[in-house]
Amino acid sequence: MTYFTVPYNIDSEDKIIGGYLSLRQFAWIVLAVFIILLLFILNTGYMSRTTVGGAISFNFLSFAVRIVVSLPFSIFCIIMAFIKKDGINIDKYLFKCVMYKLRNHVIKNQP
């Protein structure tokens, strides 16, 4: 008879990124970091160099708008990565809720 080794915890995801993060969690965190990088580092419209002396001028309103946009999106990505509802990851749970709402519901009459 052939024996197979069974993993101890088959209900959880494999933590392949440093032993702490699954690939799904890592993807959500990378998405949040990419948005922050895009808003603050690659697009530096909130900072400009003045012609006199080469000083850097800082636009606080543009910076505040970028924070207001990036903070909720980052919190959303963290929630999607780490929170579970009813034992299911929240992103999978929301996907299943949307698919349930979109599918056709057929009610059959019982005689």
Image: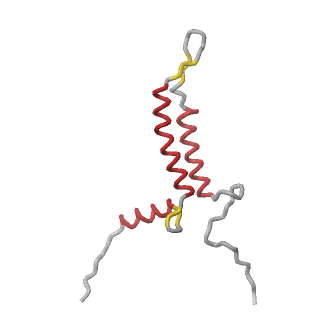
Q: Residue 90: where, in percent of width, then height? A: 50, 60
Q: Residue 15: where, in percent of width, then height? A: 67, 61
* Outermost top residue: 52
Give the image quarter of residue 13: bottom right
Q: Is residue 20 left or right of residue 105?
A: right
Q: Is residue 78 left or right of residue 2?
A: left
Q: Is 61 rendered above or below residue 25?
A: above
Q: Is residue 3 left or right of residue 83?
A: right
Count of numbered tags: 0
For the residue pair 64 and 6, the one nearer the viewer reads as 64
Q: Residue 5: where, in percent of width, then height? A: 73, 78
For the rendered model, the colour scheme is secondary structure
Q: Is 21 rendered above or below residue 67?
A: below
Q: Residue 24: where, in percent of width, then height? A: 59, 58
Q: Residue at horizontal 52%, vertical 48%? A: 75
Q: Is residue 100 left or right of residue 106?
A: right
Classify the position of the C terminus by image quarter: bottom left
Q: Residue at horizontal 59%, vertical 53%? A: 27
Q: Residue at horizontal 55%, vertical 51%? A: 78
Classify the position of the N terminus by image quarter: bottom right
Q: Residue at horizontal 49%, vertical 23%? A: 59
